[in-house]
Image: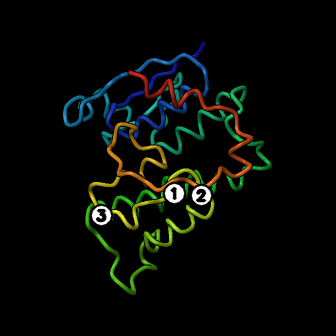
Amino acid sequence: MTSLTLYTNPMSRGQIARWMLEETGVPYDTVILDYGTTMKAPDYLAINPMGKVPAIRHGDTIVTECAAVCAYLADAFPAANLAPPTDARGTYYRWLFFAAGPLESAITNKAMGFVVPEGRERSAGYGTLETCCRLWNRRFPYPNGCAAISSPPPTSMSAPRSIGASPSAPSPPHPPSPPMPNAYARARPINGKRRSTTP
């Protein structure tokens, strides 16, 4: 079997990649890296010159960036049934990369205290945080939605959590969630989430 290694840090977006690896059901090794030291060391910079996690090595293939790792693993392990058939992937790709691109950028900017100046929304890849969250909530109304609009930084991690941030991140209380849409009710249990967050 081809070797598979996850490079990560427990307090990082690497939890997203770990969850996806658990969903594949295939064995993998984990290399824990520290911020500022081993993550910036020459050995790891040869894997990801950005000096960030996560990254995976699958045989001779290296993949970085969470959405790319998720898409790659879904394709590399089709028996896990983690992606729709190739002729039905429009919606899958749309929301996978919307979460990793516009939504995460908007949430990160809010957390850093940056607001796109009025009239300059076209220059930002996401427009406004409010627009991103409105679209996300319309498509994914369960469980907490995108709470970043009304929650001041840095206390709210609800919106990042909804797209896979570290499960140990603090989160304020939320109102009761709406009933699950039919698509969620039909989905199989996601056991990898439980395994990926167990110490």
Which image quarter is the C terminus in?
top left
Q: Which amino acid type is marked by label 2?
A: Pro
Q: Is residue 92 left or right of residue 161?
A: right
Residue behind mark 3: 152
> CA–CA distance between discs 3 and 2?
21 Å
Q: Which amino acid type is marked by label 1?
A: Gly
Q: Work out whether residue 29 or residue 106 is closer to the camera in this orientation and state it.
A: 106
- Mark 3 or mark 2, earlier in chain: 2
Residue behind mark 1: 145
Question: Which of the labelled discs sits on residue 196, or is there none?
Answer: none
Q: Give me the residue at 50% from left, 72% from top.
A: 131
> CA–CA distance between discs 3 and 1?
16 Å
State the residue lying farthest toward the front: 176
Question: Which of the labelled discs sits on residue 141, or is there none?
Answer: 2
Q: Is residue 136 left or right of residue 45?
A: right
Q: Give me the residue at 37% from left, 30% from top.
A: 8
Q: Is residue 59 above or below residue 19?
A: above
Position in image of residue 14 (x %, y %) = 41, 35
Q: Pointer 3 and pointer 1: residues touching (CB < 8 Å)?
A: no
Residue 42, image quadrant:
top left
Q: Pointer 1 and pointer 2: residues touching (CB < 8 Å)?
A: yes
Residue 86, image quadrant:
top right
